[in-house]
Image: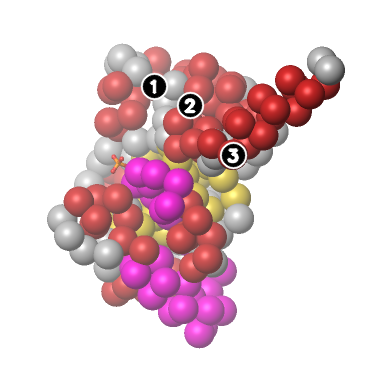
């Protein structure tokens, strides 16, 4: 399973990269705004900065909602760096744009996916990744992990190449359940990745070993 970090914060990307477990980065307009990155040129430069401090794919999201706008934006984003994946919303023109990019060999990440039907459409259109938002489903009392199970099963039934990128990860149980379900990728905030390290018996066991080493 690949680990992506879900942030536009360069320090956090560096920290995850230095840990040696980072396979890619996902961003979205809200994460860019959170870092105070404003204006077209600054945002484009920030994507390149992210590519330069990480390995693996970097998802960069279009903000147009019409086919022509998404194509123009997506082609520019893809030209910034070979590891940029164009993130496209799950809407009708988005599906058309995913098909267009797929036919041109430009990789895409279909975002804002909340149902198996949406995931099926994204795969049919040739998306490289599909991003089901499991935390946001949990927030409205639907089972986000069940959606991952369904998408993994559907894609396996037909051998779709689209990778299941579980997004909107809130805690380590989400990561473990996604791993059990066979998600290809989880994209997580840094604190959730670091939470995987934690266990009180590790802490107390290490304290005892260090104390005994002094004897
Ligand atoms: O990158 C998209 C997704 O991970 C959003 O997560 O926490 O805003 O629901 P969240």
Q: Which residue is situated farthest in the front direction here?
A: 215
* Residue 47 in the figure: left or right of residue 141: right
Q: Nearer the viewer, mark 1 or mark 3?
A: 3
Q: Secondary structure at mark 1?
A: helix
Q: Nearer the viewer, residue 64 or 168?
A: 168
The quarter of the picture where the N terminus appears is bottom right
In the rendered view, would you say 38 is above or below 80? above
The Cα atoms of the two marked residues, 2 and 1, are separated by 6 Å
Q: What is the crowding at mark 3: few (fewer than 14 residues within 10 Å), some, or many (at least 20)?
A: few
Q: Which residue is identified by label 1?
A: 43
Q: Nearer the viewer, residue 114 or 182?
A: 182
* Residue 4 in the figure: left or right of residue 111: right
Q: Secondary structure at mark 3?
A: helix
Q: What residue is rendered at 28% in x and 22% in y?
A: 33
Q: Is residue 123 visible?
A: yes
Quarter of the view holding residue 214? top right
In the image, the segment drawn in magenta is: 146-174
Label 2–label 1 contact, CB within 8 A: yes
Membership of 147 in magenta stretch: yes
- Mark earlier in primary sequence (1, 3): 1
User: Is the residue indicated by label 2 positioned so its CB lies within 8 Å of ligand 1?
Assistant: no
Q: What is the crowding at mark 1: few (fewer than 14 residues within 10 Å), some, or many (at least 20)?
A: some
Q: Nearer the viewer, residue 74 or 174?
A: 174
How many marks do you count on the picture? 3
Membership of 178 in magenta stretch: no
Q: Which residue is identified by label 3?
A: 201
Q: Which mark is residue 47?
A: 2
> Where does the image place residue 25, in percent across and percent down from the top left?
51, 37
Quarter of the view holding residue 62? top left
Q: What is the crowding at mark 2: few (fewer than 14 residues within 10 Å), some, or many (at least 20)?
A: many
């Amino acid at each position: 399973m690949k680990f992506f970090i879900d942030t536009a914060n360069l320090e956090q990307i560096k920290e995850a990269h230095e840990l040696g477990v980072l396979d890619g980065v996902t961003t979205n307009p809200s994460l860019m705004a959170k870092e105070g990155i404003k204006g077209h040129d600054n945002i484009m430069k920030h994507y390149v900065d992210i590519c330069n401090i990480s390995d693996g794919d970097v998802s960069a999201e279009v903000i147009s909602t019409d086919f022509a706008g998404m194509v123009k934006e997506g082609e520019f984003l893809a030209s910034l760096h070979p590891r940029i994946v164009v993130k496209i919303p799950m809407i009708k023109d988005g599906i058309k744009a995913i098909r267009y990019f797929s036919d041109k060999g430009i990789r895409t990440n279909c975002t804002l996916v909340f149902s198996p039907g949406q995931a099926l459409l994204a795969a049919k259109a040739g998306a490289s990744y599909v991003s089901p938002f499991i935390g946001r489903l949990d927030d409205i009392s639907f089972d986000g992990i069940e959606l991952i199970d369904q998408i993994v099963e559907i894609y396996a039934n037909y051998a779709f190449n689209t990778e299941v990128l579980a997004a909107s990860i809130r805690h380590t149980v989400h990561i473990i359940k996604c791993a059990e379900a066979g998600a290809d990728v989880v994209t997580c905030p840094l604190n959730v990745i670091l939470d995987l390290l934690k266990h009180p018996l590790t802490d107390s066991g290490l304290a005892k070993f260090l104390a005994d080493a002094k004897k």
